[in-house]
Image: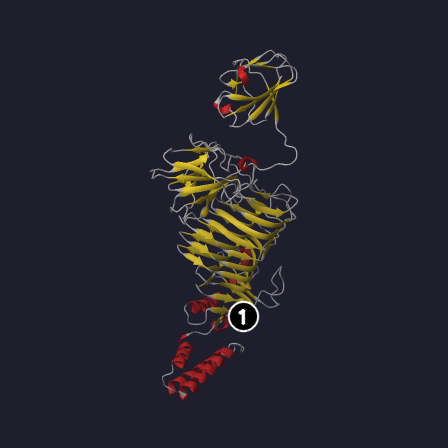
Amino acid sequence: MKMNIITSIAVTVAIAAISAALYISHSDQSEKIETLSRQLSEVLERDKFDAPLSTLSARRAQELPSAFTYASDFGVVGDSMANDGPAIQAALDSAGMDETGGTVILPQGVFITTQPIIIPPGVTLQGQGYGSSPLAIKFDSGGSTIAYCGTDHAVKINGSSSGLRDLAVYDWPYNHGDFDGGCPDIKAAGGVLIQAEGATVESTFLQNVFIYFFVGGQALTLSAINQGGVAYSNIQNVRLRHAMTGLKLEADETSFVNTNTFVGGAISGGDFHYGLHATGPGDCNDNKFYGLGIGMYDSEVAHVYVTGSTTNVKMENIRFEAKDKDMSRPIVIIDDSSYGNVINGILGHTHIKADMNRNPGIDTMSQKSVGLDPAPLNQFWNAAFKGWDGPNRIMPGWSLQHSQAELMVFEPDLYPDHNVISIDYLNYGGAFKLMSDQTLKVEGHDFVTFGVYAKSSVPGSISAAMRYTSGSIISSAPHSGNGEWEFIGMSALYSKTAPYFYFSITGDVQLTAPTLTFGQTPATPGASLMSSSGARMSGTFTLGGAIGYPPSEDSSPYFWVLPKNEGNVFMMDMLGDPVRHIHRLNHSGADRFPKGTVITLVFEESGTRVKHSAYIKLKNNQDFVSVTQSSLTLVTKGSATWYEVSRNN
């Protein structure tokens, strides 16, 4: 036991000594580490005893590589003259094969390379920063610069958990003897490329990286092709300056680039076509940006350009600047096919071009443009389920299909004044559809959000369903069947040519407080709207007023059509001939007023006769004959027949 403790202490001290050696100047570090490791091995070889802890420590010391790989040990020079590409790549490959540590340390200097630097999976290339200037690289002020002279991308990352930190990547523009003066005439395809081809590349990262002067391509690209995917990348404090495209996100039709996070950093300088360009046709969405500054003086296309039906960006607290753009040229362009974009922050110049109804999350502080929020009004008439006619299975505002199910209406539960419909499915074989009795459609919006509170002990008893913009029927998640109230609903693009929203019921269920709003606003069940729960009113309530004209000459002189949805009070204009007869009002189905509509006909002249008939039922079967400034008030049950409420003649 005594020997075990002593040896354990020796192992611990030796490991600590090795760790301390890491902080010694690396010029003599390798020799010190080798000496200490040899001494440790001798101790362990001399004292062969049964000591699990000491044995474990020894094995780790023997099996694990050092924490870092030093590029200087592989011959890098960094004098802006030698071609350091092969040496840097050798250091990275060594780290990637676990022969040395997984972090490659690049010393201060300018490292010319004519070949792309490829970062293996799990490896970090770490420099000494990028000097003192945020606008250009000062080669005499410290820092590590990869200076690329070639037509490919300067740095390529094609494996997970790998990345760059604390360095600059530069498209080298200067003459150089070793390259026959060719660098000024060569433009690279890009700076840093994170690419997934036929596989998923996850958790790559860039931190404190300056990517500079890639005016022939993209400074930073996240790309997925051939069923590949780039996800969960973390990009922090990356500066992109002078490029054709600052940041490009792209996925082919078989691939995806999503759920990547960008924090801080900036895109600035000149020569830009795009600051940020996100494009499909594959899934290129839910990429998040926080606190990014996009401040080029101008961009040939846009500072931000998003295109593709499955492409969007989430940008929070962004600052946009474009001093050289005139007001006719937008700073942000969201293609009409893209939706679900979120952009907020400060918009310093010009405006945003986007379908704001498809992108209600776009809302920047600006004097030049504004975002749009759809009105959160419940489009379901009679959302409180009032006026139930049990014997005739009639609920105002609702179409109750399939008589096989049994319906009952109970007192409110979740929300005041909102009744509960109880549906006994009775083992009916199909789906009972609960839907509005009228077509709900708002051309100004592309999205619909709707749902209903449901309580059921039958799993899957109800789901919300609708016709998607493509024409197919899609549905929400169903009820879990836990016997509790759950809100069953969905939000999606809807078909404007054939809108269709309903609740599909396949088991016993109770329902209350249905709601439907256009846009992507949250659902508002239980709202006390006048159309849903008899809300109180204070102040003056103004009824719409309209004019009732006689029938046209090519129609029956007795069949009058009052303008629907223009008011409840109609000033009857007889066009100079008050001696007319009215036998019928709005007889066609398309012209009929909803059940419960009360209208008042006001006659300024005498002599007009409203006939008692099967379609206008008057008190005591007596015709109404107008006198000067007289009126007749009628109500409808939703059919072609009107009933007298009162008269003043």
**Dot 1: what SS?**
loop
Q: How is the image coloured?
A: secondary structure
Q: Locate residue 557, reporting x and y percent.
A: 54, 13
How many numbered marks have been drawn onto this rendered protein structure?
A: 1
The quadrant in which residue 622 appears is top right
In this view, 11 is above or below 293: below
Hey, what amino acid is under mark 1? Pro
Q: Quadrant of the N terminus?
A: bottom left
The residue sitting at the bottom extreme is 2
Q: Locate residue 544, reporting x and y percent.
A: 61, 28
Q: Locate residue 554, reporting x and y percent.
A: 52, 13
In this view, 554 is above or below 197: above
Q: Mark 1 highlights which residue?
A: 107
In this view, 106 is above or below 563: below
The quadrant in which residue 3 appears is bottom left
Q: Quadrant of the C terminus?
A: top right
